[in-house]
């Protein structure tokens, strides 16, 4: 068990009168890798959007714990939350069309002090500082042409994940990271994030429909349905739970 | 020698150089960052009129007037930016265009201050070295324009340039990487607008007498046509575009090619028609502009895609 990273209190979100997320109390981040599962429309992505403030809660409070401090992030902006050390990867493919793979990583790794409009002479210094790290990522994932654009959906998805990892977050929220990736790349990045949770004290919450992956890597699993977290616990317990079987996996599969 | 180095040609070259600077500013704002500024000519005009008013009405020396005009333009742009820059690009377009309409109307209607359509002046060169004054002043304009283009060039391959491109491509994604995109955009808009004001103030002595039409919508549209023609994402896009529009139609056709005077009026009136025609031809055959390279065709295919974050 680790110290919790997130504490949600009375978090509520509804769209047009329909409650999409309704969580009285939830702590996240007490394990290295946690899984969030549930049927389509359960509110998983909405929950992640609420935590990262891409969506505004109707009401509620989200507390974030970093370096021994308790920070109320309920009203912080997307970029402030990211700078505090919590980032998310995207379910739908997101990319910068004008940036090559290397540029994308340079963007991710550039500290704010490099990015004022007058810092036009800081390119060399930035490259020198982050070159090795970028090379490590590029070698690890063998991009065909790092100085070209990410071409396939898989490359874009992978780049999205690496951009986030490069930020060295405390909390990484991954929304269906394996969707659209070939198995060998999935294995590669799972290996990498497992290592990071140990070496860098990173906590990861994965939203996935690939249940084999969830049972395989998570130490703790949340089951969400109709906007509520119904069950949580170790993967073995959750997968045998009657409610989970009935509402999600269908009888006879577990 | 003095004859050649003064008069109409140097005047036209000076105007050309200032327009190239403005088109380069538009490249930085729109081509790089995606800020659809349709009020650029008014921002430029604001700097021009402010410096002229300071000099003519308050007897300011030239240099302090230019500096004050630059700072005021930046401050006003900061105010506009705060209101509109977190809106979508259509709203930015409408907002900046509205600013243009307001400024132009004020300059025309507030005759006590600006002398309306009668024009205000004279704004003289800050130095007097006889017949060479105009040419030396042209060189100064040229140097500042080249400095601006150097800045744009360095910017493109620097961390802030990369950030601005990411804002144009996918602002929510950039934000989710911890980039304070609104603040960065706001400061960059204010800075580049202040530069436009600076070039406005610098251009004032070239015109000597200022009229509202110098900052009207026609100027903004010409700048836009020029940048799209040249290639909005390329540093020299503004330069090539200005040469292909104002350079070709206003300078070469009007002054170099001997056209009988009775046709001159027709030529003047058909200028925008010809701009439009050129623009259509370029967009048909080279959609990313004259300088837009074919290798970028991949990007063009992607630009139509709407980036929508899930949820």
Image (tube, coloured by chain):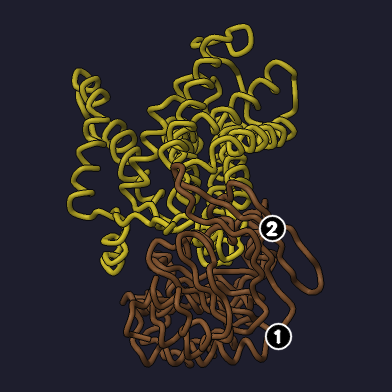
Chain colours: A brown, B yellow
Residue at the (56%, 76%) spot, across then down: A205
Q: Residue B218's spot in the image, x, y percent? A: 38, 28
Q: Residue B294's spot in the image, x, y percent? A: 26, 66
Q: Residue B143's spot in the image, x, y percent? A: 57, 50
Residue A1 marker = 1
- Pointer 2 chain: A
- Pointer 1 chain: A
Residue beneath label 2, please?
A73
Q: Nearer the viewer, residue B288 or B303?
A: B303
Residue B181 marker = none
Q: Residue A211's spot in the image, x, y percent? A: 41, 83
Residue at the (69%, 58%) spot, across then down: A73
Q: Secondary structure at mark 1?
A: loop
Residue at the (54%, 42%) spot, across then down: B85
Left or right? Give the position of A247 relative to B140: left
Q: Quadrant of residue B180?
A: bottom right
Locate the C terminus of chain B and report the quarter of the image it occupies. Answer: bottom left
Tell me if residue B146 comes above or below residue B110 in the rendering: below
């Amino acid at each position: 068990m680790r110290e919790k990273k997130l504490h949600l209190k009375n978090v509520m979100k509804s769209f047009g009168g329909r409650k999409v997320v309704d969580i009285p109390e939830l702590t996240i981040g007490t394990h290295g890798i946690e899984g969030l599962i549930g049927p389509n429309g359960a509110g998983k992505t909405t929950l992640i959007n609420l935590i990262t403030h891409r969506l505004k809660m109707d009401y509620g409070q989200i507390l974030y714990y970093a370096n021994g401090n308790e920070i109320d992030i309920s009203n912080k902006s997307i970029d402030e939350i990211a700078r505090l050390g919590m980032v998310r990867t995207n379910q739908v493919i997101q990319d910068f069309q004008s940036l090559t793979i290397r540029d994308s990583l340079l963007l991710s790794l550039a500290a704010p002090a490099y990015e004022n409009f007058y810092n036009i002479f800081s390119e060399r210094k930035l490259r020198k500082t982050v070159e090795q790290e970028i090379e490590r990522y590029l070698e690890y994932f063998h991009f065909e042409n790092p100085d070209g654009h990410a071409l396939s959906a898989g490359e874009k998805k992978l780049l999205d994940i690496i951009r986030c990892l490069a930020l060295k977050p405390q909390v990484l929220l991954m929304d269906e990271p394996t969707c659209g990736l070939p198995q060998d790349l999935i294995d590669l990045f799972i290996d990498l994030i497992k290592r990071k949770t140990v070496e860098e004290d990173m906590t990861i919450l994965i939203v996935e429909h690939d249940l084999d992956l969830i049972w395989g890597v998570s130490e703790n699993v949340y089951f969400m349905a109709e906007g509520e977290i119904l069950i949580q616990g170790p993967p073995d317990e959750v997968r045998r739970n009657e409610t989970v079987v009935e509402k999600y996996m269908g009888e006879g599969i577990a | 020698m003095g004859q050649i180095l003064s008069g109409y040609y140097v005047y036209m070259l000076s105007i050309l150089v200032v327009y190239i600077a403005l088109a380069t500013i538009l490249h930085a704002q729109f081509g790089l960052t995606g800020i659809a500024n349709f009020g650029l000519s008014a921002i430029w005009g604001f700097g021009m009129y402010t410096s002229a008013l300071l000099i003519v009405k308050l007897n300011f020396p030239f240099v302090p007037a230019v500096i004050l005009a630059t700072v005021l333009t930046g401050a006003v742009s900061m105010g506009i930016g705060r209101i509109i820059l977190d809106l979508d690009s259509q709203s930015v377009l409408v907002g900046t265009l509205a600013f243009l309409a307001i400024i132009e109307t004020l300059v025309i209607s507030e005759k006590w201050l600006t002398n309306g359509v009668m024009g205000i002046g004279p704004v003289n060169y800050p130095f007097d070295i006889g017949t060479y004054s105009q040419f030396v002043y042209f060189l100064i304009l040229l140097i500042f324009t080249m400095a601006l283009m150097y800045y744009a060039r360095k910017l493109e391959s620097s961390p802030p340039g990369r950030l601005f491109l990411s804002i144009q491509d996918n602002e929510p994604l950039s934000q989710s990487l911890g980039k304070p995109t609104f603040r960065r955009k706001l400061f960059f808009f204010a800075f580049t607008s202040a530069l436009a004001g600076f070039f406005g103030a610098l251009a004032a002595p070239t015109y000597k007498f200022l009229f509202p039409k110098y900052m009207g919508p026609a100027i903004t549209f010409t700048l836009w046509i020029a940048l799209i023609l040249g290639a909005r994402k390329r540093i020299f896009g503004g330069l090539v575009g200005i040469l292909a529009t104002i350079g070709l139609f206003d300078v070469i056709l009007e002054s170099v090619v001997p056209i009988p005077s009775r046709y001159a009026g027709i030529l003047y009136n058909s200028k925008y028609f010809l701009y439009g025609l050129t623009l259509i031809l370029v967009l048909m055959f080279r959609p990313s502009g004259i300088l837009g390279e074919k290798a970028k065709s991949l990007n063009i295919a992607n630009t139509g895609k709407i980036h929508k974050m899930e949820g």
